[in-house]
Image (tube, rainbow, N blue to C red):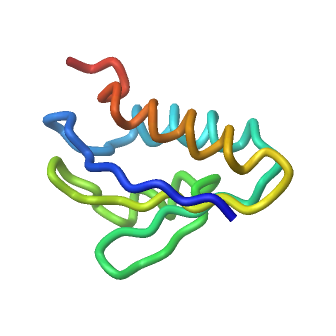
Amino acid sequence: MTEAKTTIENKTGIHARPASVFVQKASSFKSKIQIKAKGKTVDAKSILMIMSMGLVKGTEVTLVADGPDEAEAVKELKALIDSKFGEE
């Protein structure tokens, strides 16, 4: 299992477009991937679950992956969040 913490920094948080980009990226990996934030843990491959978390700017999230490509999955998804989804 591989984990990484990061903080949502884009002004609008994770709304529909970045959630879609995130889910597409997460779904490209074989590992089970989850996002933990605000005391909840959800499937990172489900856009509805991610949207339901209400991830706004300043929210700290933990990415957790377990499977054959877990290290790469966590690294790439953290980089995607840290890039502010190319919005700024």
The residue lying toward the viewer, choosing from 10 and 2, is 2
Quadrant where the N terminus is found in the figure: bottom right
Residue 62 location, x and y as percent?
42, 61
The residue lying toward the viewer, choosing from 24 and 81, is 81
- The tally of labels here is 0
Residue 32 location, x and y as percent?
74, 60
The residue lying toward the viewer, choosing from 63 and 38, is 63
Quadrant where the C terminus is found in the figure: top left
Q: In the figure, 51 relative to 52: above or below? A: above
- The residue furthest bottom is 39
Apparent side of residue 21 relative to residue 86 in the rendered image (left or right): right
Which quadrant holds residue 80? Answer: top left
Which quadrant holds residue 53? Answer: bottom left
Apparent side of residue 62 relative to residue 84 in the rendered image (left or right): right
Residue 75 location, x and y as percent?
56, 38
Residue at coordinates 85% horizontally, 51% vertically from top-left? 68
Residue at coordinates 32% horizontally, 43% vertically from top-left? 15
Q: In the figure, 21 relative to 54: above or below? A: above
Residue at coordinates 20% horizontally, 39% vertically from top-left? 9
Residue at coordinates 72% horizontally, 50% vertically from top-left? 70
Residue 76 location, x and y as percent?
57, 33
Q: In the figure, 1 relative to 14: above or below? A: below
Apparent side of residue 74 relative to residue 27 in the rendered image (left or right): left
